[in-house]
Image (spheres, grey):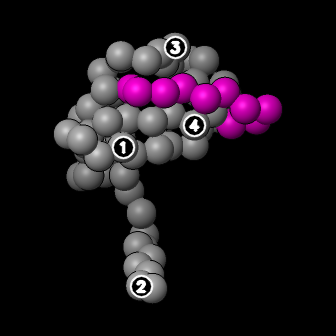
């Protein structure tokens, strides 16, 4: 599979939380947890489970930064 996204972070799935419409997938990327919100259908297609190797692929047009 070829992707235009260049921010591909490999890690391991630490949690799969299935909701009514979306599933939250937590991926440990070297000690940092990235959480992705995907459709339940996508989660089922990927058959994700804790311990699986997975990639967080990030492509965004903008990043918002905040400061307290």
The Cα–Cα distance between marks 4 and 2, rounded to whole angstroms, is: 26 Å
Q: Is the Cβ of the residue at disc 3 closer than 8 Å to that at disc 4?
A: no
Is 10 left or right of 47, judged from the image as shown? left
Does the rendering let one see residue 60? Answer: yes
Q: Quadrant of residue 8?
A: top left
Q: Earlier in the sequence, mark 1 or mark 4?
A: 4
* Residue occupied by mark 1: 33
The Cα–Cα distance between marks 1 and 4, rounded to whole angstroms, is: 12 Å
- Using the image as rendered, state which of residue 8 and residue 30 is in the foreground: 30
Q: Quadrant of residue 17?
A: top right
Q: Earlier in the sequence, mark 2 or mark 3?
A: 3
Tag 1's secondary structure?
strand
Does the rendering let one see residue 4? Answer: no
Image coordinates of residue 59 in percent, x first then y, are 38, 56
* Residue occupied by mark 3: 47
Foreground disc of the pair 3, 4? 4
Asked if residue 47 lies in the magenta stretch, the reply is: no
* Residue occupied by mark 2: 67
The Cα–Cα distance between marks 3 and 4, rounded to whole angstroms, is: 13 Å
The Cα–Cα distance between marks 2 and 3, rounded to whole angstroms, is: 37 Å
* Residue occupied by mark 4: 24
């Amino acid at each position: 599979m070829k992707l235009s996204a260049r921010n591909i972070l490999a890690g391991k799935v630490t949690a799969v939380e299935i909701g009514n419409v979306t599933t939250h997938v937590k991926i440990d990327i070297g000690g940092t947890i990235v959480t992705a919100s995907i459709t339940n259908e996508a989660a089922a297609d990927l058959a994700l489970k804790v311990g699986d190797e997975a990639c967080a692929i990030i492509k965004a047009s903008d990043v918002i930064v905040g400061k307290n």
